[in-house]
């Protein structure tokens, strides 16, 4: 307001006064406490109204009261306006057309032309703008406001920096001057350190974001699951990963685990084609029934899957020792299933 008080002359030191914070917190509590209590009351009221319907009753009462007041007001207005209108119509001896023509003639006179706003007349004469032109005008207006606001902030910042140093025309005591100068220099140093810390933090965050992709790939590289564990599911790994595990088991000479890896890869591929849904509680026969239900038109794929499932259960759950030729035939059938599922 342009009025100098002890508060404005104190500057930053008023924020270090405990009484300022106590007063501010007290006033904040006094201002917000009614709103908090009101919110609690409304919350309790609407909570109880879920069972009693009291809120609906209150709204109906308000609607009825407003309707009654509106009806009474309309009735009084009609009773008051009708006699006045009848009397005015009876007294008027000028037709509406003549009255309009007279008003237009008076308004078009030269002595009244200066009263018309020029900007309004110019805007009315302009052609209406399209949506693109209106959007461009709005964007330019917002950019202009942003530039003016930024200019104002810069000016205020330099004024604040200028006010940090003592004026040459003032001659206060030497001790006070030294103390104020030291304090202002300390504030400037703290401000510079704060800016440097923020810059350093932003640089570290930017560097971490650049290095995060490689680190995440290293961290998220999950170890290969135990193929002998009955608790693993086909959607634990993608199809390519199951095929890689099958190749590793073949090289290790364990055809039984390699067969299971190929079978899990087949289930994962069928789940990706929306032909089955992987669940821990489903059995192999349930997967077969679900596949017959969802992909009943793929007769050849269903036959190959049934044959492969029979061989897999004999080897995995039974004591049948599969040979390399039989395993190669099983692997060929699995590839055939993957190819038929994609058609």
Image (spheres, grey):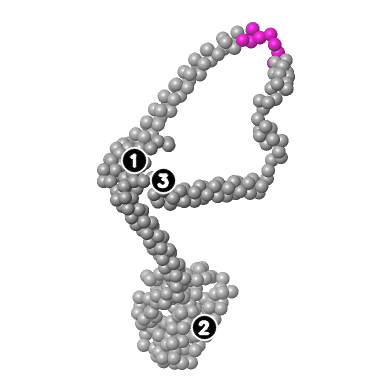
The answer to which image quadrant residue 225 occupies is: bottom left
Q: In which quarter of the image is residue 89?
A: top right
Q: Give the structural element (helix, strand or loop) at label 2.
A: helix
Where does the magenta region start and end? 88-97
Category of crowding for the residue at label 2, using alpha-carbon neighbours closer than 10 angstroms: few (below 14), some (14–19), many (at least 20): some
Give yes or no for contact between labels 1 and 2 (Cβ–Cβ under 8 Å).
no
Q: Is residue 117 left or right of residue 310?
A: right
Q: Name the foreground residue: 17 vs 222.
A: 17
Q: Where is residue 18 in the image (x, y as percent from the top left)?
A: 26, 46
- Residue marked by disc 1: 7
Query: In the image, what residue occupies the spot 55% across and 50% down?
Result: 147
Q: Earlier in the sequence, mark 2 or mark 3?
A: 3
| Residue at 47 percent of width and 18 percent of height | 72
Q: Tell me how far mark 1 sits from mark 3, CA to CA.
A: 23 Å
Which-is-in-front pick, marks 2 and 3?
A: 3
Q: Is the magenta stretch mostly helix, strand or loop?
A: helix
The numbered dot on residue 333 is: 2
């Amino acid at each position: 307001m342009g009025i100098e008080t002890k508060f404005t002359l104190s500057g930053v030191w008023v924020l270090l006064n405990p009484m300022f914070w106590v007063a501010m917190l007290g006033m904040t509590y006094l201002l917000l406490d009614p709103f908090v209590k009101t919110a609690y009351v409304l919350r309790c009221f609407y909570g109880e109204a879920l069972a009693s319907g009291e809120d609906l009753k209150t709204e109906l009462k308000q609607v009825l009261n407003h309707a009654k007041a509106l009806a009474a007001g309309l009735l009084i207005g009609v009773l008051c306006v009708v006699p006045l209108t009848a009397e005015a119509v009876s007294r008027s001896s000028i037709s509406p057309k003549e009255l309009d023509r007279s008003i237009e003639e008076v308004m078009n006179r030269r002595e009244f032309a200066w009263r018309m706003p020029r900007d309004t007349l110019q805007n009315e004469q302009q052609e209406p703008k399209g949506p693109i032109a209106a959007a461009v005008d709005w964007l330019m207006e917002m950019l202009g406001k942003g530039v003016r606001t930024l200019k104002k902030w810069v000016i205020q910042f330099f004024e604040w920096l200028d006010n940090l140093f003592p004026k040459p025309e003032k001659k206060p005591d030497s001790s006070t001057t030294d103390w104020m100068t030291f304090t202002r220099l300390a504030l400037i140093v703290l401000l510079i350190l704060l800016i440097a810390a923020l810059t350093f933090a932003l640089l570290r965050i930017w560097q971490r974001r650049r290095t995060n992709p490689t680190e995440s790939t290293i961290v998220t590289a999950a170890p290969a699951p135990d193929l002998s564990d009955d608790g693993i599911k086909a959607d634990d790994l993608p199809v390519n990963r199951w095929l890689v595990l099958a190749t590793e088991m073949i090289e290790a000479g364990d055809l039984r685990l390699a067969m299971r890896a190929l079978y899990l890869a087949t289930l994962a591929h069928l789940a990706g084609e929306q032909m089955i849904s992987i669940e821990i509680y489903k059995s192999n026969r349930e997967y077969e029934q679900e596949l017959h239900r969802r992909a009943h038109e793929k007769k050849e794929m269903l036959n190959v899957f049934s044959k492969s499932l029979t061989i897999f259960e004999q080897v995995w759950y039974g004591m049948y020792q599969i040979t390399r030729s039989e395993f190669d035939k099983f692997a060929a059938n699995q590839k055939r299933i993957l190819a038929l599922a994609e058609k």
